[in-house]
Image (cartoon, grey):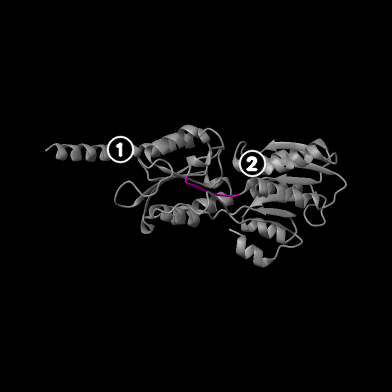
Amino acid sequence: MKKVFCLLLTLCMILSLAACGGNGGSGGGKKSDGPITVGIINNDPNESGYRTANDKAMRDTFTEANGYKATFYNNNDAAQQIATAQQMIQDEVDYLLLSPASTTGWDTVLQDAKTAGTQVILFDRMLEADESMYAAAVVSDMPAEGKTAVDWLASQGLSEYNIIHIQGHMGSDAQLGRTGALNEKVEAESTWNYVAQQTADWDEATARTIVQSVIDSGKPFNVIYAENNGMARGAVAALDGAGITHGKGGDVIVMGFDSDKWAFEAVLEGSWNYMGLCNPLQAPTVDGIIKDLQAGKAPAQKIIYTPEQGFDCDTLTQADVDTYGT
């Protein structure tokens, strides 16, 4: 009888430890039978053509037919994103997929997710956190995008660089990476100068207003470095309105970022000089990571960078436009 009691006591202790242990933020498997539940927090699809393509890819991938029950939330406000993430964790989603509007402020969300056993996967944008707090990240290397663009601009060999720098949403991974490389160059080179450095918050009309203000001031400039294609298009509208030539052989170098097919075509025709590709199609890779985790396999890499490169008007081909434009 004593042996039976000891066996029962041991079994109870094992079950208790299993119940308390949870699966943290990095274990595998889902919590219940049925479809895999995912909460997907993204930025506003109206922000840019890139974002529209990114959002569509997520919605096309995380479907009932593919074994998911997905809840989507789109907002460029970090506080709203964080509040919604907390609610999704309380709703006990199996996976929380994040494209954070800001790189900071997510510590409580990540800790709560880990405690609840909700796995976090970052996509599109990074945030500031220890790698142990998320299962994987499928993102663009924003500092590399910025460096590639600035290196290309330096290769143009201008005697002086007078730059209108139009920034994206301040504090976002994309803005920090694309701004950082240019700031470093301007600080290091006496012939590189900012005529204006302002955020248009990814908005085309605001970018046009910024450039128009510089034109009205009479300050000379020969480079527009816009941190997404929509803002570059707004800048070009201001140039066209003032009769200022731009692109290949023009008075002003125009640079943008993202993957919009129409922007590729602007580079191909020589109206723009450069576009840094930012690949929006991370959803299939995220789906593969989740399927691996479901099977108990850890991701082969913690951070997976989507393949990207820069294109300019001298080397871009129609094949590139067809391959990479979205």
Amino acid type at image mark 2 = Gln
Image quarter in which the C terminus is found = bottom right
Seen at 16% across and 37% down, the residue is 5
Q: Pick whichever of labels 1 and 2 is earlier in the sequence.
A: 1
Q: Position of residue 236 (x, y in %)?
A: 72, 49
Q: Tag 2, which secondary structure?
A: helix
Q: Is residue 189 magenta?
A: no
In the displayed structure, does residue 229 sit left or right of residue 187?
left
Between 2 and 76, the one lying in front of the other is: 2
Q: Which residue is mark 2?
A: 175
Crowding near pointer 2: few (<14 within 10 Å), some, many (20+)?
Answer: many
Q: Residue at x 64, y 57 (%)?
A: 262
Main SS of the magenta segment?
strand
Q: Position of residue 105 (x, y in %)?
A: 53, 32
Residue 17, labelled with which disc? 1
Give how far across and how far down residue 237 sits, in percent.
71, 48
Q: Between residue 284 and residue 107, name the one nearer to us.
A: 107
Does residue 256 appear anywhere in the picture? yes
Name the residue furthest left: 1
Q: Is residue 202 above or below residue 52?
A: above
Q: Which element carries disc 1, helix, strand or loop?
A: helix
Q: Residues within 10 Å of mark 1 (few under 14, many from 20)?
A: few
149 left or right of 293 in image: right
Q: Which residues are magenta?
A: 135-140
Instruction: Say what amino acid the circle numbered 1 marks.
Output: Leu
The residue that appears at 41% across and 52% down in the rendered structure is 293
**Residue placed farthest to the bottom in the image?**
319
Q: Is residue 238 visible?
A: no
Q: Position of residue 317 (x, y in %)?
A: 70, 65
